[in-house]
Amino acid sequence: MEIKTVLDIYDHYLDRLGGESSFGHHDGKAWKSITGNEFRERGRRFAAFLSSMGVSKGDKILLISHNRPEWHLTDYTAHLLGAVLVPAYPTLTAKDTAFVAVHSEAKAAIVSTPLIAEKLSEGKTWVGDLKEVIVLEHSGAPHEALFYLDEALRKGESLISEGFDPAGKDRPEASDLASIIYTSGTTGEPKGVMLTHDNFVSNAKAGLARFEFRESDTTIVFLPLAHSFERLACYAYILEGLKISYAESIDRLLANLRDVRPTVMCAVPRLYERIYGRLMENASRSNYLKKYFIHAGVNIAERWAKARVMENRKPFFLSIAREFFDLLFYRGIRTRTGGRIRFFVSGGAAINPDLEAFFYGVGLRIVQGYGLTETAPVLTSNSESHICFGSVGVPLDGVEIKIDTDGEILARGPNIMKGYFKNEAATRECFTEDGWFRTGDIGHLDEKMRLFITDRKKELIVTAGGKNIAPQHIESVLAENNYVNQSVVIGDALPYLSVVIHPNWENVRAYAERKGVAVTAVEELIVHPQIEHLFDNVLKRANVKLSRFEQLKAYRLLPGELSVESGELTPTLKIKRRVVLSKYKSLIDSMYEGGRGGLGREKRTAK
C-alpha cells in the first residue's frame, strides 16, 4: 500500500503483524504483548466510543500518558477518526496542562490516571471544550465524570455490534493536520506546533533511508512519546516492521534492557553520561591497579575510535590493546545495555565528542541527529556506517540546510511544520521572507555538508569582554565528571564565566567517606573544606579541556536537583536558563561580588 498518512503507517504495520505480537509491556509481574489483530480491534472499538461522544474529523484529542501500548492505541484511534492528536507530558503542572487543553480546543482527553484527570477539572466540569475524559488505569479516587478505557472499549464493542462503526470512514489526507505538539517553553509560553500527516510520513521515510533499521531489529521505547523525537522514531520502526517494547521507567531502564535486549533504540546524552559516570565512579572507588586499567581502557577506546572514524586508519597496536580491554571490561558495558545494541540514535541535545568516541570504541555506536519539534523533527543525521564525532550529520533526503549571515541554521523541506496554532505572529517570525525556517540554533557546515551545532541562538553568552560563548559545550565537558550531575554556566554581560553545579551527591558522599569526612548531610558537605577542594579540582580538570576564553572562574553548589516539577527543566529535561538565573540570582551574584555566597560559604575560585 502507498504510505501517505500516519494511519497508513499503522495499517501497514498491523497488516504485517496479523496474529503476531508487538507492543511489549511489563505489567509489574511479567512481560506481555498485543497482537496486530487485537490492537486493530481495540482501535475500532475505541473509535466507535469516541465517535458516539461527538468526536469527529478535525477535532482535537488530548493525550496525557506515560509510554505504554495505549499511547499508540490512542494515536491510531485518533487517525481512524481523522482527528488531531495533542500529546502532553504527565509531568506538566496543572496550570500548563489546563493551558494545553484549553488552547488546543481539545474535545476529549485520554489520561493515564485519575490524578492527571484532576488537572483538567474545574469542580464538576472540565476545562475548555472538553466533553469527555477517559482514564487508562484504575487508581486513586475516581472522578464522578470519568470513563475508564475498559468501559469505553466495551461500549464501543456494543456499538459496533449494533452497526455503528465509524473507523476509517473519514480517513485523513496527507495535507491534513495530524498533531499539535506544544513546545517545552524554555523562553516563554508554549506554542502549539501544527504538524501534518505528510510532515511525519516524509520524515519517517527519509529517516529509514538514513538510519538503516532492519525488520529483524527490536527496540525499547523510554523517551517520552509526547516528544516528537521518540514518536517519529516509532513511526519509522513501525514502517520497517520492528517489534516495539516500552520501558517501565527510567529507573528500571537498565533492567528492562537486559530483559528486552534491543538492537536499536533512541536515547539522549544523559543516558550515556550516566553509564560513563558509573564507570568513572567505579574507578575512583577501586585500588590503584584497577583504577589504572579503567582509565587506560577509556583512553584506548577514544584513541582507537578517533583513528578509525576521523582519520580512517586501522591502528595496529591500538587495535590489539582494544581487544585486550574488550575482554577486560568493554563487554561488560555492552552487556548492561542488553548485549545486542547495533547503534543508538541520539538526539535532544549535543553529546560530547569524546564521550561519543568512547562509546564507539567499546562497541556501542551512537548515531547523532539534529532537529526540532517544528521540523517533525529530524533535519540531519549521521548513519550507522557514516559517523563524524562532533557533527550531527548531513541533511536527510528532501531537506535543505543553509547558514544565515549571523550563523543561524535555516531549513527547508517537506517536514517543516504548517505553523503555530492560533499564533500567526510567531509563525511569521520563524520564517524568512523566502520561506526558510529559522531554527534558532547557531552552527556551521563543512565541505561535506556535515552540520556542526554551536548552541541555541538565544542562549549564547556574550561576556563583558565581547566573547561569544556556547554554554552547552562547557556543560558537556563538566558532565564527563562523575561528581557532576547538572550544571548551568553563567556569564552573559559579566567579566568571566561561572557555574552552578548540582553534584552527584551519592558519589560525593562516597568520596567523603574515603577521605574520612564524618558528615553526610548535603548542607554540611557543601561547606566542608574537603568537598570544596574536590570541586576546585573538578573545575581545574574541566578548564584543561576548554579554551582560554571559556575558562570557569567560580562555582556554587546546589543542594537540590534541578527538576521539571520545580520549573527549572522542561519535560524533555532541557534547562530553563531564565528560571535558573532568576531563582538563584543571589547565589549567582555572590560569585561576582566577592565575600560570602548565598549558601554561607566563601567564594570558591579555581586557581
Image (cartoon, helix red, strand yellow):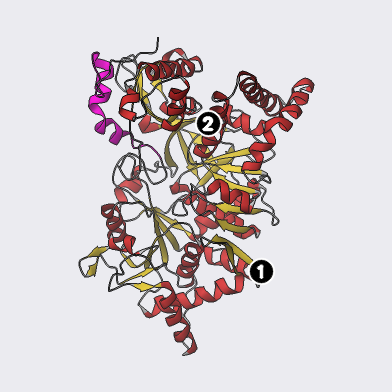
Image coordinates for residue 272, horizontal then vertical, percent: 55, 36
The answer to whether the residue labelled 1 contacts the one labelled 2, judged by CB atoms less than 8 Å apart, is no
Q: Tag on residue 20?
A: 1
Looking at the picture, which amino acid does disc 2 mark?
A: Gly
Q: What residue does disc 2 label?
A: 277
Asked if the magenta segment contains residue 588, the reply would be: yes
Relative to 339, residue 37 above or below: below
Relative to 119, residue 134 above or below: below
Image coordinates for residue 601, horizontal then vertical, percent: 27, 18
Relative to 274, residue 257 above or below: below
* Residue at (29% x, 15% y) in the render: 603
Furthest residue to the left? 123
Furthest residue to the top? 607
| Callout 1 crowding tier (Cα within 10 Å): few <14, some 14–19, many ≥20 | some
Asked if the magenta segment contains residue 211, the reply would be: no
Image coordinates for residue 384, horizontal then vertical, percent: 67, 41
Image coordinates for residue 214, horizontal then vertical, percent: 69, 53
User: Is residue 431 left or right of 257 when viewed as pictured?
Assistant: left
User: Is residue 190 left or right of 301 when viewed as pictured?
Assistant: left
Looking at the picture, which amino acid does disc 1 mark?
A: Glu
Name the secondary structure under disc 2. helix
Name the secondary structure under disc 1. loop
Front residue of 553/510: it is 510
Residue extent of the magenta highlight: 574-599
